[in-house]
Amino acid sequence: IPVQGTLYPVGRLDEDSEGLVLMTNDGELANRLTHPKYGPEKEYKVLFARQPDEHQLDAFRHGIILEDGHRTAHAQVIIENLHGKGAWLRVILTEGRKRQIREMGERIGLPVVRIVRVRIGSLNLGSLKAGEWRPLKPNEVRLLKQSTAAGATPPLKKSPSRPPARTSPGVRKPTPRITPKPRGR
């Protein structure tokens, strides 16, 4: 990104995921958007290899104990549409542990095929394609700061049922690596 100064990545995407990555020159905003203490929501469209049953959906909603013994925070989960033997779900998290959605799926028998992050706090991916970027509008920055100050983000809205477009083979998605501190309990 041809911008002078220091840029901080907000969150991370593993090599097999795609979608919204926020880069900012505001270190305090980056901290508030990555630290679980502030509870910023991160929204994903996730294609699972199987269609979930109500028990599996409830497990996502109430938290799942991961292999390391950590119990995930409650998540919002909505079935967007069925896709062959699988299903596209919208998953909204307020924490961001490494490969969390993939491990949650594995633990309850729902292998993940694809993950696309579509929102961080009040900021939506919109129509940006892989590798594209744009500067934030002043209003977007203001809303991000407000959402982290109060720990609140916009309510869940129904989106079109069509899954996001697939990226071209060989296109590398940016994968910044940053590890937020785990929630203190």
Image (tube, rainbow, N blue to C red):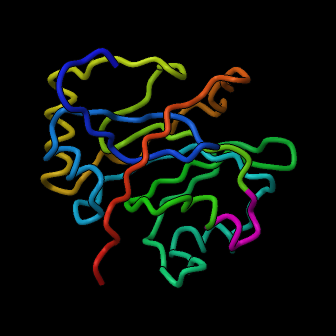
Q: Is residue 106 magenta?
A: yes
177 to the left or right of 10: right
Query: Where's residue 21, x and y in %?
Result: 41, 35
Residue at image point 30% right, 15% down:
2
Residue 146 appears left or right of 48: left
Residue drawn at x 60%, y 28% as measured from the top left:
172
Q: Residue at x 22, y 29 (%)?
A: 140
Q: How many marks can you see?
A: 0
Residue situated in front as seen by the camera: 180 or 126: 180
- Classify residue 67 by image quadrant: bottom right
Q: Quadrant of the N terminus?
A: top left
Image position of 98 with respect to 42: above or below = below
Q: Position of residue 62 (x, y in %)?
A: 51, 75
Examine the rendered structure and indicate whether residue 163 appears above or below residue 150. Answer: above
The outermost residue toward the front is: 5
Picture residue at 68% right of the left edge, 43% below the top? 114
Q: Is residue 64 magenta?
A: no
Residue 169: percent from the left, percent from the top?
A: 73, 23
Q: Quadrant of the C terminus?
A: bottom left
For the record, the magenta segment spans 104-111
Residue in the foreground of this view, choosing between 177 and 138: 177
Report the front residue among 8 and 29: 8
Left-right relation of 23 to 143:
right
Question: Would you place residue 135 above or below residue 110 in this image?
Answer: above
Q: Answer left or right for 24 relative to 78.
A: left
Image location of residue 116, percent across then percent down: 57, 39
